[in-house]
Image: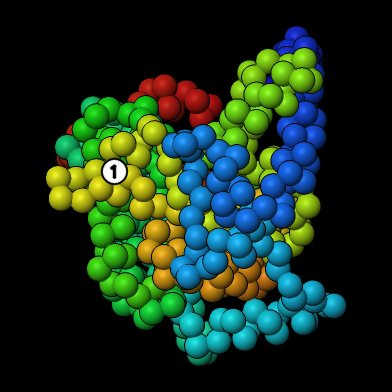
Amino acid sequence: MTLNLLELATAIEKRLPELKELSIFQREYSELGKELIDQIGNKDFLEFSALLPPSPAGAIPILEGNEKEGNWRFIRKFKPEFESLVEAKNWAKTVLSGRAVGAVDGSQIYPGNALTLPLGMVNIGWYINYHDGHYELQHESSFLLPDELGYNPDSGVSLCREEAEVDKLIELLGRLNENDLVFLDGSLVLSFALHVFETERRRYVDAVLRLLQASEKTEGPFLAGYIDNSRATDISTMFSSLISIHLSSAGLKDAQRPSDASLISYGMQWGDRTAAFICARDDILNHYRQENRDYSRDIAFFYIKASHGGISRVEFPRRIVEEGKVGLLADIVRAQTIVGDGYPHALNRAHHEAVVSIDKREKFIGILRCLSERHDLGIGTSLKAVKKRI
């Protein structure tokens, strides 16, 4: 049976009042963002900090390297104005010339119910452009057995993928040079791990901590997590008292926190970024602690308008802020999005190398069936899965 579009339209119609309420909030958040940027746009570091509670939650402002307090601004304007795409690409070429930019991404095949045994696969793709005429594009696949997948096999595959991506990122960090860049596709702050079993959470957190330790040890390449159209609420949390006042004056309850991107997009042109902030979420980051090292305030971020669409978030180790290299990192990100038509070129190449299509998943299951028959492995086929194909 195919999806009944009339039934779908009816289901949406029933929830129109809720959609309208959400729309009202979105408009208010847009107005709030305008007021907020107008209010803080010209404030220096001390003036900005004075607006915040004594112990800010969500995000903590920080000076970038030897930056003077009086020179600090929330929005950092991108000064070059390109007259043409050719000019933009020439600028990007200058920034990237002789600088290696790598990226790692992963994909997976979940066990699902096609087979009677939970078996999975992880495929890790990576790409490095040395910007000297040479590049590297490869992938590596791992076959996963039930004892590697744990109580929830699908969740186990996702965890194995995360660990495999981190292993490859650590390898690239060890191979590249100072001021090169390695992208990971996603966040260093794994808030979703709050909602998995404790043993899985520990492995997710341990993977990120291994990555942060490797970055700290090499003191070389930049490490950056790129989140396109981020829905994070760290800056929104930092300004929660101001947001509550605004919504109250508009006659609205503080029902949900607006995303950072919806607050800060006002007045940002292509290439503009925010100042750097320390991520200060008091949930998953409370787990980013070890006996001999506390990483709970070691992840920084900024937002950047790197395409003509939404606002993207870039996360990176705190040391990059303290070394005064955030501006250089932002330039590399801008250059990568110019080459990649709005999305970092290296991440796009790594993604296409990693992706496992539906067709490849069917072939994976077919290979397992053939091997099972040939070697009498006892890997059966789920009757439900067969019927779903009819």
**Residue 217 position by quadrant:** bottom left
Q: Secondary structure at mark 1?
A: loop
Q: Which residue is mark 1?
A: 288
Residue 287 location (% of width, % of height) = 28, 38
**38 w.r.t. 286: above or below:** below
Residue 239 location (% of width, % of height) = 60, 35
Residue toward you, 54 or 386: 54
Q: Which residue sits at x=67%, y=52%?
A: 43
Residue toward you, 331 or 384: 331
**Residue 171 position by quadrant:** bottom left
Q: Is residue 292 left or right of residue 188?
A: left
Residue 265 location (% of width, % of height) = 72, 48
Residue toward you, 359 or 197: 197
Residue toward you, 272 or 388: 272
Residue 67 location (% of width, % of height) = 53, 68
Whether residue 279 is visible: yes
Q: Is residue 43 left or right of residue 111?
A: right
Q: Give the quarter of the figure containing the N terminus.
A: top right
Classify mark 1: residues with Cα within 10 Å, few (<14), some (14-19) or many (20+). some
Q: Is residue 259 left or right of residue 269?
A: left
Whether residue 8 is visible: no
Q: Which residue sits at x=77%, y=20%?
A: 249
**Residue 253 position by quadrant:** top right
Q: Which residue sits at x=25%, y=48%?
A: 294
Identity of the residue furthest to the right in this view: 83
Q: Which residue sits at x=57%, y=43%?
A: 50
**292 w.r.t. 234: above or below:** below
Identity of the residue furthest to the top in this view: 14
Residue type at mark 1?
Tyr
Q: Number of callouts in the render?
A: 1
